[in-house]
Amino acid sequence: MDDARNHLGFLSRDETIALARRGILVPDPGSVLVSGDVRLAEDIVLWPNVILQISAGGSIAIGRGTHLFPGTRIVALGGSVIIGNEAEVGEEGGFTIKAGAGETIDIEDGVRLLGGGSLILSNRIGRGAQILGPIRCQNCTLADGGTYRDPEPDERGGVLKGSGVARGIEVPQGHVIQAFGPFTDAVMQRQSYFHPKG
């Protein structure tokens, strides 16, 4: 097992177990693959079947308190992936994040990415923003705002929800685009439309 891990640039099983000494929780070390150069902060949770892979001079940095749920795959093939603090990535079906040479994927604090979607090419997912569903995002920008727990929907970070392909999409604070197909054809709405008060 360790020969294959070492050949592919991943930590050995014992090195993966040892991440706990740095305050990183790994409930099932045998199913988790982490490249040696990945930068991990304290209180991160790496759930089973998570892959963090670096090659060709890429970089991955993950902030404090972030949860990477089962089936999450983050790959830096010469590019850069930065995930902030207290993000939730991959619940309800995993998530794929892949940055090639010269590409940067910037995921800010409190972001929620779930439902089997993906980020490829360069993207900026702002503070508190969300991607909900199997959406393939390429060169998208979701604005900063509050997290999904913020009581004011129109003050939350930008949201994409549904399924399909989102290319070059920009979503301002407090707005959402819901689509089931190409997101370029969908109407942008206030988040309060989906979460009315009272």
Image (spheres, helix red, strand yellow):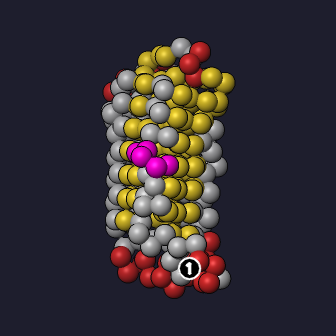
Quadrant of the frame with the N terminus = bottom right
Query: Label 1: few (<14), some or many (≥20) within 10 Å?
Result: some
Quadrant of the frame with the C terminus = top left
Does residue 194 appear left or right of residue 39 in this picture?
right
Does residue 120 appear left or right of residue 24 in this picture?
right
- Determine the secondary structure under disc 1: helix
Task: Determine which quarter of the picture holds residue 13.
Answer: bottom right
Residue at image position (33%, 33%) is 145
Residue at image position (57%, 43%) is 118
Can residue 103 be seen at all in this image of the molecule?
yes
Along the viewing direction, whichever of 156 and 51 lies nearer the viewer: 51
Q: Which residue is mark 1?
A: 6
Q: Position of residue 25 (x, y in %)?
A: 46, 71
What residue range appears in magenta?
100-104
Q: Is residue 29 magenta?
A: no
Can residue 152 be seen at all in this image of the molecule?
no
Residue at image position (34%, 67%) is 42
Does residue 1 appear left or right of residue 63 in this picture?
right
Q: Position of residue 40 (x, y in %)?
A: 38, 66
Tell me the chief SS of the magenta region: loop
Residue at image position (43%, 25%) is 170
Q: Amino acid at mark 1?
A: Asn
Q: Is residue 86 above or below residue 57?
A: above
Q: Is residue 24 above or below residue 171?
A: below
